[in-house]
Amino acid sequence: MNINATLIGQSIAFFLFVWFCMKFIWPPLTRALDERKRTIADGLAAAEKGRREQELGEKKALETIKKAKQDAAEVIALADKRAAEIADEAKANAKAEAERIVTAARADIGQEVNRAREHLRRAVAELATAGAAKILEKEIDAKAHAKLLEAVMKQL
């Protein structure tokens, strides 16, 4: 094997090429690779963070829905309770009003009964006076015998 000038020239050219690549090509390439690696790592970290935030958001949403359901159930229970109270109040008011109306009606009936009795007493007294006048065949003066007629009306 003979080392000649071609081999030495090729070796020098190879070393110059390696030096040139190490000096000018390799650093931008490693920077680009590092940048790409950092970008990928940041993307993966962001994706992981987004996934965790999504899980937290879903948990918060479920808790909010659960709380809203509880609040709605409480509102419905309060509304039912208030409706029952209103119904009870309405029943009590209606009962009181009915009792008041019945009491007023009874008072009116009592007054009407008293008026009817008084009217009936007068009619009976007039009939008795007319009957007595026919029996005695003379007229009895109602004004003259007022005390007697009042006594008769009271007895009736």
Image: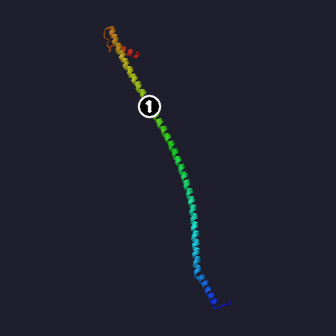
Residue lying at 62% horizontally and 85% vertically, measured from the top left: 14
Residue 94: percent from the left, percent from the top? 45, 34
Q: Is residue 146 visible?
A: no
Considering only vertical position in the picture, is 69 above or below 137? below
Would you identify the image quadrant in which residue 34 lies?
A: bottom right
| Camera-nearest residue between 12 and 47 | 12
Considering only vertical position in the picture, is 139 above or below 80? above
For the C terminus, the image quarter is top left
Dot 1 lies on which element?
helix
Would you identify the image quadrant in which residue 25 lies?
A: bottom right
| Camera-nearest residue between 78 and 102 | 78
Residue lying at 51% horizontally and 44% vertically, measured from the top left: 78
Residue 126: percent from the left, percent from the top? 34, 15
Q: Is residue 33 visible?
A: yes
In the rendered image, the residue lying farthest to the front is 1
Residue 67: percent from the left, percent from the top? 55, 51
| Camera-nearest residue between 117 and 149 | 117
Type of residue at label 1? Arg
Would you identify the image quadrant in which residue 151 lies?
A: top left
In the rendered image, the residue lying farthest to the top is 136
**Disc 1 packing (10 Å; few <14; some 14–19; many ≥20):** few
Residue lying at 57% horizontally and 64% vertically, measured from the top left: 49
Give the colouring mode of the picture. rainbow
For the N terminus, the image quarter is bottom right
Considering only vertical position in the picture, is 22 above or below 134? below
The residue labelled by disc 1 is 100
| Camera-nearest residue between 78 and 46 | 46
